[in-house]
Every structure is written in C-alpha cells, then in structure tokens.
Image (spheres, helix red, strand yellow):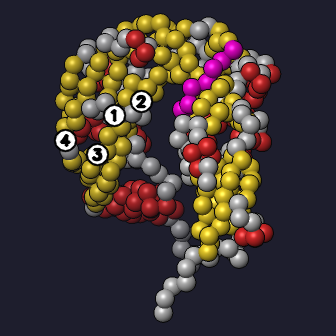
Amino acid sequence: MQTKVKYGKIAIVIFITVLIWVWADLALDEKLSVSNVPVTVAKSTNPALWVSFGEQPTVSIGNIVLKGPASRITDVKRKLNAGWLILEFFLDAQQEGMVNAGEYNLDVLSFLRKSDQIKQLGLTVESCDPDKLTVKIVELFKKPLSVRCFDEGKIPLEAESIEPSKVEMFVPEYWGGEKLTAEVKLARREIEQARVSAIEKTPSIELAAGQRRDAATAVKIKMPPAEDVLKNYTITRATMGFSLGENLQGKYKVEITNLNEVISPIAVKATPQAKQAYEGTRYQVILEIDDEDVKSEESRREVVYNFPPEFVRKGEIVLNQPPVQARFKLTPLSATPP
C-alpha cells in the first residue's frame, strides 16, 4: 500500500520551523561597542553659516553601543573588522533645527537613532558617550576678497594677471584688511602651464584649521615668463663649509685669510622660493680644497655657491655678482701626545 505524501503539512512544518529560528534570532539581541566614531559637519550646510564643533569640522564620539539580532551584530562586526564598513555621521544643522547663530547642545543619542546608516544596518543605538555635543554657529557675510597665488610651500607667487582679481565669499563679519584674501595654491606643473596660457583655479579661504571654503566661481591665472620672475636679493648671513679629500681630513687646519670677504653678503637673482631654499641650506658657500694645496704657502680659489640643484636646473637662481676668490693656507695639526 503506497503512502500518500502530504506536501501541505510538510510546508507548514518547514514554515513554522523557520519562524521559530527567526524569532529565536530576534529574541537573542546582542550588543556591539564601537569607539571613536566621527561626526562631520555636512557640506550641504547653508553657506551663510559656519557650523563647527568648537571651530573644528569633525568631532569623535568616544563610544557607541549598538544593539540588535545576533546575526546582524555578527555581520556588522565582521565588516568593521575587515574595513568593509566605516561608521561616520554627518550633521546637517538645519535638520536639527539649528538655523541661527549661537551655541547649541546636540542630543547625540537622538541624532544617532535617526541616522539612515543605523537603520540600514538593522540595528539600534542603545547608548553613547558623550551624550551631548556643543555645536557652534557663526553667521557669515558676503564680502569681496582679493585673490592671491601661492605655491605648495605657501610662498607667495606674483601673477601676471588674475581674472577676476576679486571674488565674493561668505566670511566672518570681523574679517578685514589682509584677512580679506582668497588663496589659490598652484603646483609646480600648474605654474609652468600658467606661464604658457591662463589656467582656471577655484580660490578658497580657511575659516579655521582644517575648515576650508571654496569660492562659487573660478578665476583665470596667467603667470609671467620664467625670466621675468627672478628678483634681486641679498643673502646677508652666509655660512661657509669645506670640501677636503680623505688625505687631508683630520690632518690640516684651513685658515682663510680673507674670511670677511668670503662670507660677505651675496647678491643673487632668484624666485622667492629659490631664495628661501638657498637661505635654508647648511652652507651658502663651499671652498673646495685639493691635496696639492698643502704645497703652497697660500692658495687661491673661487668659492662654490651652494645653490639648491632643483632651482638651478629650473633657472630660478643665479649669482648676481663676480664670484669671490678665497685666499687660504693649510696648517698641519700637531700630533696628539701619547
């Protein structure tokens, strides 16, 4: 006698079993602590407002305790450990009802629980530390700012033309004078390109460390030809070094008989960057000494001006005076007594 398979009953049993497993998983909530989670001011903030956490664009929440089904907690923990998931929250001040200048206390727990990221993870936020954050809002005012160019080392560059020469930007009301400047930073390749034809760049300001704002419009910058950017400078404090062969090192003392002339102010033509780099070298002038110099009562040789090689290659620094000739003699060092 054949037994009739009752598929309907089997399906019901399977369905009930699955429900039991799902219910069991949901009933067994687990917790997960996550440390140092950043909250950053959203870029969509009203440009007429400067929103910050004590003049900082980002603040860290020391600890967040997440709660949810064991399977979801396990999955989130795995993704965090593998770097596939990064928890980060963005503050839109207007959405939190912060629309006027002043200081506000942000209820961090409420803010996190409303987060779409937390909802998408299928978790809830049980607690956090700190539970309050101070949000500072400063009203900004639109003012015309002069545009200035700088290289990557923050050294000013003299542009041939900047069109337009001023841009309007939102800045604190108390800004005035030199502070009303929008900056354009040019990389070396951009400087070279701008010598040939104008390039477009967007000026920016720094409200505080790490808080930059870009202008709404770009400017066209043209740099002068390379030969026109060299200016006359005088290096007033020069230091001197010696280059001796192994046969002379530790055996002779070098005596410069016209030392004041050798380390006198040095006239150069250079770009501001090259001049600054030259001043920053350990020795501005170097005297090269040969083994044959020990045979002379007094030797004469032009000093080497130790210009930074990268600026020499680009033609950004040259000597603007006749090279100085050093007069020197080598005196044997007395032997150390036993």
Q: Is residue 183 left or right of residue 158?
A: left
Magenta residues, dominant SS class: loop
- Decide: marks 1, 2 in contact (CB < 8 A)? yes
Secondary element at image label 4:
loop
Instruction: Please tell me which of labels 4 and 2 falls first in the chain.
Output: 4
**Residue drawn 47% across the image and 51% down it:** 85
Mark 3, residues whose alpha carbon is within 10 Å: few (<14), some, or many (≥20)?
Answer: many
Instruction: Please tell me which of labels 3 and 4 falls first in the chain.
Output: 3
**Residue drawn 41% across the image and 17% down it:** 179
Secondary element at image label 2:
strand
Where is mark 3, residue-wise? 61
Q: CA distance from mark 4 to mark 2?
A: 25 Å
Instruction: Please tell me which of labels 3 and 2 falls first in the chain.
Output: 3
Where is mark 4, residue-wise? 131
Secondary element at image label 1:
loop
Residue 26 seen from this side: no
